[in-house]
Image: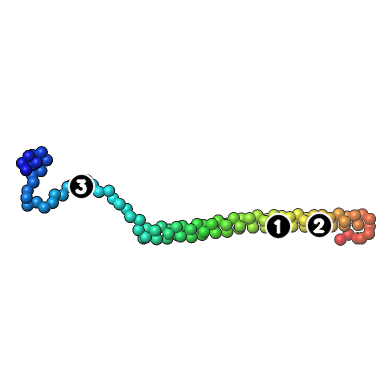
Amino acid sequence: MASLESSIGIPIQPNVRCITLEKGPKREYIRKSKTDERVKAINEQSNEQSEEQINKKVNEQTNEQTNEQVNERTYEQSISKAEGINANRQIVMEKLIKNKKIDTI
């Protein structure tokens, strides 16, 4: 026994039942739990809802802008048509006055 103790460097005692070895630092094991998955699902759902709200606002703004542009164009076209009609009336009236078919207005 003495030779075994001197070669290993650990004294062996008859009363010792087990020897525990000191282990190095343990690696952390992160277990994915169901709560993590639930939180992730809730976050994704809230992100989707916020994206939908943002898209709705953007669509409303672009629709308003295009409606305003269309309204301006139709207004300008109606004004130009009215001016054209008035110009045609004036030309017809001048021709009639020239031909003395009607008196002045």
| Label 2 crowd (10 A; few <14 / some 14-19 / many >=20) | few
Categorize mark 3 by other alpha carbons within 10 Å: few (<14), some (14-19), many (20+): few
* Tag 3 secondary structure: loop
Q: Nearer the viewer, mark 2 or mark 3?
A: 3
Whether the residues at callouts 2 and 3 have beta carbons within 8 Å, the answer is: no
36 or 76: nearer the viewer: 36
Residue holding disc 1: 75
Disc sitting over residue 31 in the figure: none
Amino acid type of the residue that numbered disc 3 sits on in the rendered structure: Lys
As shown in the figure, which amino acid type bears the numbered disc 2?
Answer: Ile
Q: Where is mark 2, residue-wise?
A: 85
**Which residue sits at x=5%, y=41%?**
2
How far across and how far down the image is residue 28, in percent? Answer: 28, 50
Q: Nearer the viewer, residue 93 or 61?
A: 61
Residue 52 at least partly seen = yes
- Closer to the camera in the image, 63 or 37: 37
Amino acid type, mark 1: Tyr
Cα–Cα gap, marks 1 and 3: 85 Å
Locate residue 93, reporting x and y percent: 87, 57
Mark 1: few/some/many CA within 10 Å (<14, 14-19, 20+)? few
Which quadrant of the view contains residue 94? Answer: bottom right
Sequence-earlier tag: 1 or 3: 3
Residue at figure coordinates x 48%, y 58% from the top left: 48
Q: Kindly identify the residue that appears in the image at 90 percent across and 54 percent down.
A: 95
Q: On the rendered structure, is 27 left or right of 56?
A: left
Q: Residue 31: which quarter of the image?
A: bottom left
The mark found on residue 23 in the picture is 3
